[in-house]
């Protein structure tokens, strides 16, 4: 039996997808330098399109894509989740190898 869409949505919302938000790992005392480099002034500097916001938007889009894949076909959903899991495992393995050389 497949779980309800509501339950799956709640689980998907728990995904951090941290590899798509590298600025969340920047130390607070270094964040300003990255903001200067990546934030974009709009309306003549009246407001800014922040990199942090772009990263959050990307993560939201990925979560929506996962749900859409589920609606399309359970097999497509499974492939998407499997790819995400493989990506996380590769990243963890890479970090582990670098840390323990």
Image (cartoon, rainbow, N blue to C red):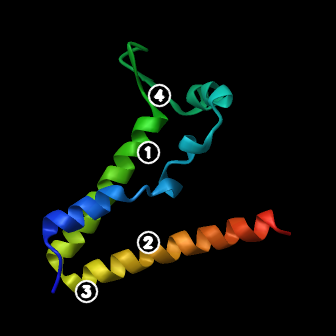
Residue 22 in the image: x percent, y percent?
A: 56, 47
Query: Mark 3 falls on what kind of element?
Result: helix
Please tell me which residue lies in front, 13 or 44.
Answer: 13
Query: Pointer 4: what residue?
Result: 40
- Find residue 67 and report its image quarter: bottom left
Residue 1 in the image: x percent, y percent?
A: 15, 87
In the image, 83: left or right of 64?
right
**Which residue is located at x 82 percent, y 68 percent?**
100
Q: Earlier in the sequence, mark 1 or mark 2?
A: 1
- Mark 4 and mark 3: Cα distance apart in space: 40 Å
Residue 51 in the image: x percent, y percent?
A: 48, 36
Query: Mark 2 falls on what kind of element?
Result: helix
Residue 16 in the image: x percent, y percent?
A: 43, 55
Query: Pointer 2: what residue?
Result: 84
- Mark 2 and mark 3: Cα distance apart in space: 14 Å
- Mark 1 and mark 2: Cα distance apart in space: 17 Å
Question: Marks 4 and 3: which is nearer the front?
Answer: 3
Q: Which dot marks residue 55?
A: 1
Query: Mark 1 falls on what kind of element?
Result: helix
**Which residue is located at x 40 percent, y 80 percent?**
82
- Find residue 13 and report its image quarter: bottom left
Classify mark 1: residues with Cα within 10 Å, few (<14), some (14-19) or many (20+): some
The quadrant of the picture occupied by the C terminus is bottom right
Q: Name above or below for residue 49 compared with residue 24.
A: above
- Mark 2 and mark 4: Cα distance apart in space: 29 Å
Classify mark 2: residues with Cα within 10 Å, few (<14), some (14-19) or many (20+): some
């Amino acid at each position: 039996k497949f779980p309800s869409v509501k339950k799956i949505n709640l689980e998907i919302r728990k995904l951090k997808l941290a590899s798509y938000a590298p600025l969340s790992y920047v130390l607070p005392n270094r964040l300003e330098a990255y903001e200067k480099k990546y934030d974009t002034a709009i309306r003549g500097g009246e407001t800014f399109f922040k990199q942090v916001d772009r990263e959050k938007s990307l993560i939201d889009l990925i979560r929506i894509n996962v749900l859409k894949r589920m609606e399309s076909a359970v097999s497509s959903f499974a492939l998407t989740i499997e790819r995400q899991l493989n990506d996380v495992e590769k990243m963890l393995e890479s970090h582990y190898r670098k840390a323990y050389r």
